[in-house]
Every structure is written in structure tokens, then in C-alpha cells.
Amino acid sequence: MRSPFPLWREERDPLATIQQDMNRLFRQMGGEMPTLFGERRFPALDMTDKEDRVEISAELPGVAREDVKVEAADNGLVIRGEKKSEHEEKGENAYVLERSYGSFMRRVPLPFDPDPDRIEAAFRDGILKITVPKPEEAKREPKAIEIKEG
């Protein structure tokens, strides 16, 4: 059956198609490619720097808590998981497929090496909240250094 949206496939931006193919390749290799052409990274994050901690909120709609892992890594965190397909219909024609499924990974760099034993994570209503306490040396206020002549 022919699509009722005849221009949908023919008029796709070829650069966006290349970017999507490259992103798919990097995900299969376990990595992440910088975003181009307005494509967003998944999961979308909010990261707030507090006096004694860093708070991270990640949107994971349609992902189950048991399908998400948070790992401490060198100077950061790695959020990985899988968004599973809800169902598969045989013999049905899809005209628009914008939702994505499959494995994901997002590196979250931090300005310090996190202590994995002190990190807390909670998941509710599709939002992953992570609290990363700062080590004592990271809590210090920046100090201006006097520049001497000579």
C-alpha cells in the first residue's frame, strides 16, 4: 500500500538522514555521537550544581526502572538502559514512526571523580533523579591568585 504522505520520504533532508545513520552506528558500538541538526540526546538531562552536591534529573518516558542502570565512571556518570517496544503488529502499515526503541547510553561528565558509594538514584514517573555528593576538595570556593610582576 502506498503512503498517503507521498512527500514524506522523498523530501527528507539528506544531511539529517546521514546524521541519523551515524548516530545509529555509534549507539551500536556503545558510544555516543555529538548532536547535529537539532537532534536531541537521550535521555534529556537537567543538571544543577549545589553547594555540596550535583543533582541530575533525566527524562526516561516509557522506560521501566529495572531497565535503567547508573554507573560511576572516571569524572562522571554513565546512564544506560533500554526502551522496549510496546508491541509489534504484523501486517500493519505505519505512516509516521517518530518514537524510538532500543538501547541507550549517556555519559554525564562531572568536574570531579564521584564516590560511587555515596551516589543516590531514584526513579519515579519516568524521571530518574541522581544526587552526587561533592568531595571536600570540590566544595571549596575558588580563590583568586595574586599575579606578581616579574
Image (cartoon, grey):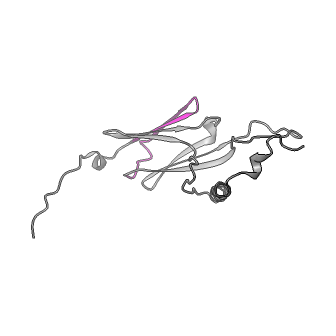
Q: Magenta includes 40?
A: no
Q: Quadrant of the N terminus?
A: top right
Which residue is at the front of the view, 23 or 122?
A: 23
Q: Position of residue 16 (x, y in %)?
A: 64, 54
| Residue visible at 41% across and 49% down in the picture | 114
Against 138, residue 53 (above or below) is: above
Which residue is at the front of the view, 109 or 24?
A: 24
Q: Position of residue 45 (x, y in %)?
A: 50, 41
Q: Magenta includes 118?
A: yes
Judge left or right: residue 52 versus residue 70: left
Q: Quadrant of the C terminus?
A: bottom left
Judge left or right: residue 3 versus residue 37: right
Q: Position of residue 102 (x, y in %)?
A: 69, 46
| Residue visible at 41% across and 48% down in the picture | 115
Against 25, residue 61 (above or below) is: above
Against 132, residue 32 (above or below) is: below
Which residue is at the front of the view, 116 or 126?
A: 126
Judge left or right: residue 136 versus residue 74: left
Query: For the view shown, which residue lies furthest in the left direction?
Result: 149
| Residue visible at 70% across and 51% down in the picture | 12
Magenta span: 112-132
Q: Position of residue 100 (x, y in %)?
A: 68, 43
